[in-house]
Amino acid sequence: MLNSSLRQLGSVLRAKKISSVELTQMYLDRIATLNSELNAYITVNPEASLAQAREADAVLAQGKGQALTGIPIAQKDIFCAKGWRTTCGSKMLHNFVSPYDAHVISQFNNTGAVNLGKTNMDEFAMGSSNETSHYGAVKNPWDTARVPGGSSGGSAAAVAARLCAAATGTDTGGSIRQPAALCGISGLKPTYGVVSRYGMIAFASSLDQAGPMARSAEDLALLLNTMAGFDERDSTSLQCEPEDYARDLDKPLNGLRIGLPREFFAEGLSSDVGLAVGTAIAEYKKLGASVVDISLPNSRLSIPVYYVLAPAEASSNLSRFDGVRYGYRAPEYTDLADMYEKSRAQGFGAEVKRRIMIGTYVLSHGYYDAYYLQAQKIRRLIAQDFVEAFKQCDIIMGPTSPTTAFNLGEKGDDPVQMYLSDIYTIAVNLAGLPGMSIPAGFGANNMPVGLQIIGTYFAEAQMLNVAHQYQLATDWHSRAPQNIKL
Ligand code: GLN
């Protein structure tokens, strides 16, 4: 059961070979046994999950089950879910119980999926290792001395350790793809605007995008079918016709032109990751694809651009956390200004404060033109590079992360080293493009390597096809961490 695909789980549920209550209880039992070691979940609420499972069973009994009805899905703790504590990995929201559902949560609820719990994450999604979480670091199920990646590390670890059937994540600069790569699972960041951000706690609104995390591309397609869709409550939600993201899974790849950006295979890429990615590309050639050398000349500027724009937006978004209406409030203060200061000083962690300070600085009078405006201009150039590249190829491939999972604590004192984890993912967010990561073998110390697949705008169905064909030809995606009880 733990290795079943979502499609298989859906059919055994609809055939009533197992009930949603039994399936949900099985995962809750696993979480009770294994979460103390992995710390993948911040909050579980067995009563709420089992109540949803009972409702799903009633729907299934009437023969009205849909693709995900009764399937337990873990939700990143960045999504507001009614009646659930929603912390965003921060002390600031340690006591916040959401009075409403994010769009993504209501989409899953409407289809009858079960909310299995809220997964651990870097504080306000700022980080690449899950070590900035107020609730403690998540451990990588492949080696618990190593990080799972971030910021959706709890979701990635939960999927890899079979502590849920699938999960959600969010990706502002790589937070779905990088943890997916480091934990040996599949993850997709859709085109900006495909999934509504309503009720998803904002980090950098022009970059944030929610997406699915699962063991296979086929599972991702089913999840995206539920998550995507227009929502008038998000002004950047796109009015597109609903599509079936699984429609092209079985297409052959003959004639596919894969662009390999030379900048993604240069200095900084560790040799074990380069080797595994090279082997994956060779597999694609066997499947009928050809390879084109391309260039993304401005991509080298994506980290500095991102670390101007994302903190700028974050400093504005996070100004709402002031201790007044909800969230953390300092126990002692003298007056209102002191209450704001102390609540924010005590409620936010070091990385969040660093970003608020950078963001406030780059937006301040006198520096705005030099930093923020310049970064916006380069952002456009980075996006334009992809437009040019897609004239020569159908899909872009490269590594997701420059290295496999590093040790807990290894990069804690060096923010710039930590920021470099996203060197291959951030340009995709700056351009608003869809990107995904799929397992493509193992590197040093037997840690998983991720292959990144980047498509043009709205190419999700094609990317899932490209990923699925590889997963039919290889079995990297079905490997499970050995030290996890199955
Ligand atoms: N690691 C990047 C950061 O720290 C990206 C995070 C994300 O995508 N949410 O900002």
Image (spheres, rainbow, N blue to C red):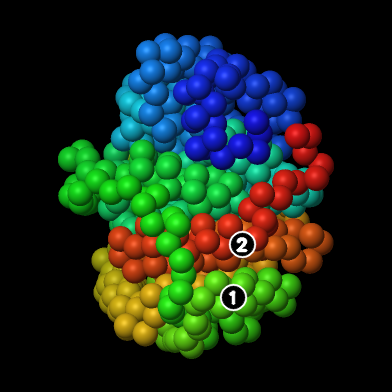
Which mark, residue 473? 2
Query: As displayed, is residue 64 above or below residue 430?
Result: above
Mark 2: few/some/many CA within 10 Å (<14, 14-19, 20+): few
Is residue 215 positioned above or below 304 on the image?
A: above
Q: Secondary structure at mark 1?
A: helix
Image spot of residue 163 (x, y percent): 64, 33
Q: Residue 325: x percent and y percent?
A: 33, 25
Above or below, comparing residue 462 to residue 28 in the picture: below
Earlier-in-chain disc, 1 versus 2: 1
Task: Give residue 286's mark.
Answer: 1
Q: Nearer the viewer, residue 204 or 157?
A: 157
- Residue 342: in sight, yes or no? no
Asked whether disc 1 touches disc 2, contact meaning CB atoms under 8 Å apart, the reply is yes
Residue plotted at (47% across, 23% down):
14
> At x 46% / y 70%, what residue is drawn?
253
Distance in Å between CA atoms under marks 1 and 2 = 10 Å
Vertical position of residue 13 compared to residue 382: above or below: above
Foreground residue among 97 and 476: 476
Is 292 left, or right, of 40 in this rendering? Answer: left
Amino acid type, label 1: Lys
* Image quarter (top left, top right, bottom left or bottom right) of the N terminus: top right
What x and y, as percent, mark residue 177?
A: 52, 57
